[in-house]
Image (cartoon, rainbow, N blue to C red):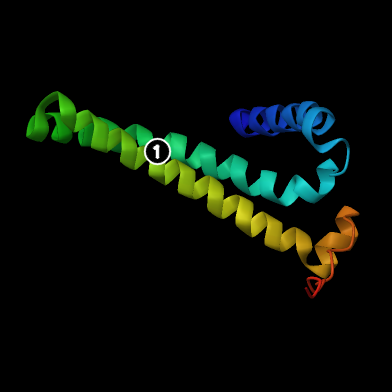
Amino acid sequence: MFTLLMAVQVARSLHRLCRRAWFVRTVGFSPLLPSALLTAPGTVGVQYGSHPVMPGAVARGVAEFGPFGLMPTLMSWLVAASAVVVFAITIGAFVAEEEPPRSLLGAPEPPRHIDPPQL
């Protein structure tokens, strides 16, 4: 539980820093909250889930392919961790754009479809 709270606090601190540098205060923290709340436990789950799995996977990779067997094992872990982050951010963005959460979070209206100019 402490790790999850630390992850949320670090994410909030990084958001404040990045909002000043990149977003120029156009995106508040509240519309990003669903993504953060999904990403934090997902990444913590990958962290704790990798403890029982990775030692055996590394040992099998090294036994089968030698020192180069470490690379596919680490790459598969990286793909799994990236997939968790991408899916959590995508689901969080979808949730934040729906009407009830959007109004509760104070997010702005989504942009309407604008037809491109005819040449």
Question: What number of labels is visible?
Answer: 1
Q: Is residue 109 above or below residue 105?
A: below
The image shows residue 27 at horizontal and vertical percentages of 84, 44
Residue that label 1 marks: 78
Foreground of the two, 36 or 82: 82
Where is residue 65 shown, x and y percent of the image? 10, 33
Q: Which quarter of the rendered picture does the C terminus lie within?
A: bottom right
Q: Nearer the viewer, residue 117 or 30?
A: 117
Query: Where is residue 100 shown, x and y percent of the image?
Result: 84, 67
User: Farthest residue in the front direction?
Assistant: 119
Residue drawn at (10%, 27%) of the image: 66
Amino acid identity at mark 1:
Leu
Relative image position of residue 76 (x, y in whole percent):
32, 42
For label 1, the crowd category at 10 Å Cα-Cα, with few meaning under 14, some 14 to 19 and many 20 or more, is few
Q: Residue at x 29, y 38 (%)?
A: 53
Residue at 22% across, 36% down: 57
| Secondary-structure class at tag 1 | helix
Figure quadrant of the N terminus: top right
Residue at the location (36% across, 39% down)? 77
Q: Is residue 38 left or right of residue 67?
A: right
Q: Quadrant of residue 106?
A: bottom right
Q: Is residue 5 left or right of residue 119?
A: left
